[in-house]
Image (tube, grey):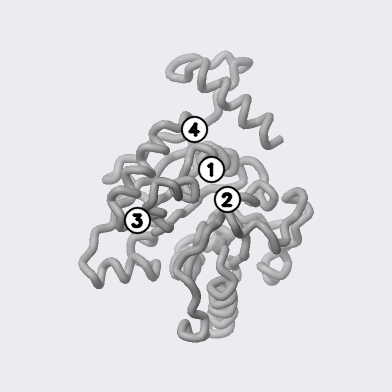
């Protein structure tokens, strides 16, 4: 198992300045996932769970065992941290034969390249755990939850898929809630329902390195779970709570990414 002390790096970086040096496909079907999931049959190499900003990979490897029928991918912008997680997964595969074959990691900038790797409605779950708060107002555009990025997450999530957020910073939690509540593609899952019925919630609250650190220090963990609402298509004759503004929004998103 690799040692963290050999992979120390800055706690955070500016994602808006890390736009060069990343290899990415022109389209999702052009990326070869063989190196990431070598023991998974080619026809089954479809990532359905994302850990955005995976850090040292605690959630990524935990999800591999709690969601054995899903391919889990941790994504991280920092090179040293990503290399640590890659070696960690390799060691776990050796120490536990037959396990962790469904987990991997990839270094990239999630604020720019997600649609290059994944198809529309491919994801079942997207986790955003303890992201950089970027406290200064001028740096809020660096936050990983925004209206624009939520539109990307909505594009990637299948209807009924879930977006998970957790932070120990109350102000950032309120930001997450404000942005998600204002987005027409998401509805909040009641906290009690999420805790009772969704094992992913307990995993993100207990198994990430940051969640364990917060628990040791006696801090609070603020979480929210949002479900992807099905797109409204006027040609389907749907009526009810969907408004004309929702349909215009969905049409705009489809034109943007198709």
Q: Earlier in the sequence, mark 3 or mark 4?
A: 3
Q: Where residue 243 appears, x then y in whole percent?
A: 48, 17
Pointers 3 and 1 in contact (C-beta within 8 Å): no
Pointers 2 and 3 in contact (C-beta within 8 Å): no
Mark 4 crowd level (few <14, some 14–19, many ≥20, 10 Å Cα): many
Does 167 appear above or below 235?
below
Disc 2/disc 3 C-alpha distance (Å): 19 Å
Dot 1: what SS?
A: helix
From the image, tell me which residue sits under label 3: 167
On the picture, is 40 further left or further right than 86? right
On the picture, is 245 further left or further right than 225? right
The one nearer the camera, 67 or 54, is: 54
Disc 3/disc 1 C-alpha distance (Å): 18 Å
From the image, tell me which residue sits under label 2: 111
| The C terminus - image quarter | top right
Pointers 1 and 2 in contact (C-beta within 8 Å): yes
From the image, tell me which residue sits under label 4: 185
From the image, tell me which residue sits under label 1: 149
Q: Earlier in the sequence, mark 4 or mark 1?
A: 1
The one nearer the camera, 209 or 96, is: 209
Disc nearest the viewer among 2 and 3: 2
């Amino acid at each position: 198992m690799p040692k963290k002390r050999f992979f120390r790096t800055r706690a955070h970086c500016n994602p808006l300045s890390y736009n060069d040096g990343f290899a990415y496909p022109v389209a999702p079907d052009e990326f070869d996932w063989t190196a990431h999931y070598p023991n998974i049959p080619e026809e089954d190499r479809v990532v359905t769970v994302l850990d955005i900003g995976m850090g040292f990979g605690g959630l990524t490897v935990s999800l591999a065992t709690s969601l054995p029928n899903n391919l889990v991918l941790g994504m991280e912008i920092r090179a040293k941290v990503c290399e640590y997680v890659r070696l960690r997964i390799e060691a776990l595969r050796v120490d536990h034969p037959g396990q962790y074959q469904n987990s991997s990691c990839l270094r990239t900038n999630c604020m720019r390249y997600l649609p290059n790797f994944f198809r529309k409605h491919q994801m079942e779950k997207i986790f955003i755990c303890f992201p950089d708060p970027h406290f200064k107002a001028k740096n809020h555009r660096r936050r990983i939850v925004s209206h624009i990025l939520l539109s990307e997450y909505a594009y990637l999530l299948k209807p009924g898929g879930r977006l998970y957020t957790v932070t120990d910073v109350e102000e950032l939690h309120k930001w997450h809630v404000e942005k998600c509540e204002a987005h027409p593609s998401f509805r909040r899952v009641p906290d009690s329902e999420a805790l009772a019925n969704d094992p992913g919630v307990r995993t993100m609250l207990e198994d990430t390195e940051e969640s364990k650190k917060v628990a040791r220090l006696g801090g609070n963990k603020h979480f929210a779970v949002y479900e992807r609402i099905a797109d409204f298509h006027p040609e389907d004759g749907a009526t009810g709570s969907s408004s004309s503004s929702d349909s215009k929004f969905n049409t705009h998103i489809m034109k943007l990414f198709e």
